[in-house]
Image (spheres, rainbow, N blue to C red):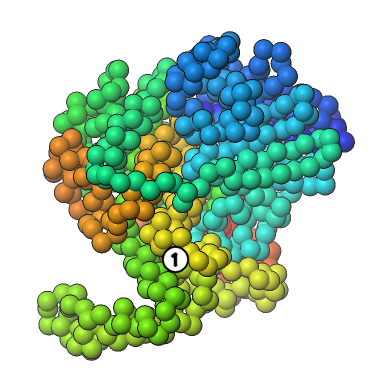
Amino acid sequence: MCGITGWISREGLSELEREKVTRMNSLLEHRGPDGAGEFQHSNLSMAMRRLSIIDLQGGGQPLYNEDHTLALILNGEIYNFIELRGQLQARGHVFRTRCDAEMVLHLYEEYGDDCVHSLRGMFAFALWDGKRRRLLLARDRMGEKPLYLWEGKDRLIFASELKALLQSGAVPFELDPAGVSLFFNYQYVPEPATPIRGVRKLPPAHLLTVDLDPWQITERRYWNMEDAPPLKGSPGELLRAELETVSELVIRSDVPVGIALSGGLDSGSIAVLAARKYPGIMHAFSVGYPGYPGEDERVEAKALAEYLGMPFHEVEVETGQVVDFFPELIFWHDDPIADISGYGYYAVMRLAREHGVPVMLQGQGGDELFWGYEWVRQAARESHQKSALRKRGWAALPEYLLPALPGKWTRNGLRKWVESVGGLRPGWERFQRHRASPPDRLRFYDVCYDFAAQYGFYEGLYTPLFRERLEEASAYEPFTRPWPWPPVDIVTTHLICDTYLLENGITQGDRLSMASSVELRLPLVDYRLVETVIGLRKTHSDRMLQPKAWLKAAMKGILPDWVMNRPKRGFSPPVRLWTAGLFEAYRRNLKDGYLVQAGILKPEAERFLAGDPSQSDLIAMLSFRALVFEMWCRRFS
């Protein structure tokens, strides 16, 4: 695990530009406290920071091929490096290190840009081909490792974190209205956008090449989950096989590996499979809150750890700690992310580092791949109806008017059922709503009340000038797809992975683990496992089954029933308590603050958001997002 950065220019680099690369690299030290390296060329400067995980003594970067015509810096881990090493040695390649990253150099010698197709793991890398005077940038399929880009006239700058670009002076702090608006609608900025003008992320599963002779920048996608071939067979057996494989790959390390454990299905599945293969004793880490409120999962996590024979470590987070650390948390998030549970992630990773465990496994991805969120299931149902409407017009109306049973067999539930004419009225209203919406827009985030409600609400908070600068930017763009759509279940899975999982989950996990110099590994987003899910979904439908039915089938007989049958509880802290504490401490920052001075929010709007955030859930959400973005702008500007 590392941090990487670089600057390439058509006309050659000045000493000042090289100094900025050195400065960017120093700002990534938390990502790699164990060493640093640089590569210099007349037109290119690349640098990296190293967190030593595999080949602790011999894996320093940059890495070179035999004649030094290729130079590589890489952030991440290539999990299948042992298998690749054997294949490449059989073809005559000679290795100088035991490092997993060296595989990329020799694969590039064999296959060129297609080297990425052989890699199983998480990575963002920069490879300089001296013979072709060409730079190759690549990012892993699911986007576990970040890579920010800024393009100017005949030059390109890249870095693992946004803070390196901004605080080094390499890129000016100038807000992008479209990115700002996306943040307020989503609580994060969906990739590849960022809130900074001119800065974007290289999308997951993409390659970017920069040729010097002549100067040309080219970008292409090399993988798409929707292209996974159809699979027939038992979902439980096929998924179990992939889970067994990936759980063996992700424990490869020359330093201790631990797991963030909640005691639920996702982290429990990883824990039970990985612990069986781990050569040592794997430690478990968990977070809780004073008084063991309903959000606290330590009891269940400890019970599973004891069942698996894992030493268990816990940290109890108090509201005062969250309040005091809030400005620093925003800094370590790197991107503006208004997820109040972020401190819990940070606390677990810091606890692991304090116990000498620099590699952690986590169960992110299970909810997104296996229908863990009810709103995503609803979005898929409604997109399926809208697809039928697009194909058949009024003939699709009966699908909307299917009678429904009462939600609850209570007097109030029966009354609501009668008022809805047995469920027919909501179906008719949904039919009309789908007819009126743009035909290429899937149903996705707009099934959530808070998204739809705030979309219009913010229009009244923005200044007229800021609304004009938004031009044609739309919060609906991330889930607008040209017709015909892929199968709805598959495209919905892709959407939730490309939005909430990628930016709120994976990004937050990467930054808050690296803040403590911990490498985070996410077995449930392994691309082969994802391809298996999509392939099965092309021949089976699991959307109407119980949530995570396929994952439970895969873990049957391995994970105890008392874990499998636990009610779902999201990784959520005492939200109201934390929100009240944060606003008590920081609400003054919202009054005539940066967002007003920058012409984004009206002064009266910001004062309104700085008021009592408990007056409604919607206002509390809007206020928290405004507070996060206000403090993010102050820190990074």
- Tell me which residue sits at (26%, 26%) in the image: 275
Residue at image mark 1: 445
Percent coordinates x, y for residue 523 in the rendering: 37, 36
The outermost residue toward the right is: 11
- Tell me which residue sits at (53%, 38%) in the image: 140
Percent coordinates x, y for residue 387 in the rendering: 42, 71
- Tell me which residue sits at (21%, 45%) in the image: 553
Q: Nearer the viewer, residue 419 or 635?
A: 419
Element assignment for label 1:
helix
User: Toward which corner of the image does residue 218 lie, by quadrant?
Assistant: top right
Percent coordinates x, y for residue 119 in the rendering: 50, 30
Q: Which of 198 and 605 is in front in this view?
A: 198
**Residue 30 seen by the camera:** no
> Is 69 located above or below residue 626 in the figure?
above
Q: Which of 557 and 85 is in front in this view?
A: 85
**Residue 308 seen by the camera:** yes
Percent coordinates x, y for residue 185 in the rendering: 51, 65
